[in-house]
Image (cartoon, rainbow, N blue to C red):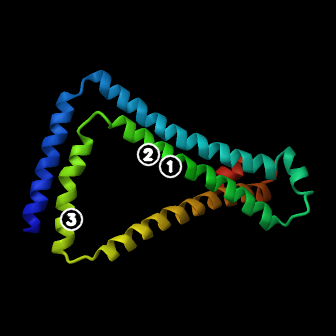
Amino acid sequence: DVFLWKRKAWFYMQEKLLAEIKGLNIVEGLFIAVYLLILFGTAMLALFLLVKRFYSNMFGDEGYLTHTLPVTGTQLLNSKLICSFTWMILLVPIWIGSILILFAGTDAFSDISFYAPMVLEEVQILNISSFSVGIILVELILMFLFGLIGAILSYYLCITLGQHFLGEHRLAGAILFY
């Protein structure tokens, strides 16, 4: 029964994908490609700006003023981390809203309504409680949040190591450590 469900879902996905590919013209395909590039570009631009602000505030000309403040290095790092984390988290609803707007006039939402009963049936077949599904969703959200914090801290670490070990080639050192 589970095998039959997976087979039905697979054939349905192939059929929908082929129909959408046949229905797309070159202009629509180019618009979608440009849209995806813009989404990727916003993520990279946000990351670049956050890393650049950390570099200039901590190790650039502004660093002299930053390090004269009556706070510890840990407090400085935490303030930079909170700011960067907040900006990256604020971008997520913008991306999701943008994707929802993009797919508002398509059959994407009908596909979700097609798969939702199949997923619920699968959950009942596997005897998974709603509590377990909730725990899995919470775990996924926490993994995303802690992964984002880890990524930001790894960028900060690379910049810091590049500053301390390679003297005048600081930017190259930061890239090398990354």
Res. 138 image quadrant? bottom left
Q: Nearer the viewer, residue 160 or 22?
A: 22
- The vertical placement of 143 against 171, above or below, is below
Q: Dot 2: what SS? A: helix
Q: Nearer the viewer, residue 81 or 44?
A: 81
Mark 2 to mark 1 CA distance (whole Å): 6 Å
Residue 172, given in percent of the width and then of the height, sits at 70, 47
| Residue under numbered circle 2 | 96
Q: Residue at x 17, y 30 (%)?
A: 22
Tell whether label 1 touches label 2 (CB within 8 Å): yes
Residue 2, given in percent of the width and then of the height, sits at 11, 67
Estimate how packed mark 2 is, as few (under 14), some (14 to 19) or many (20 or more) residues with alpha carbons within 10 Å.
few
| Residue under numbered circle 3 | 120
Q: Nearer the viewer, residue 87 or 56?
A: 87
Which amino acid type corresponds to the residue marked 2 in the rendered image?
Ile
| Residue under numbered circle 1 | 92
Mark 3 to mark 2 CA distance (whole Å): 24 Å
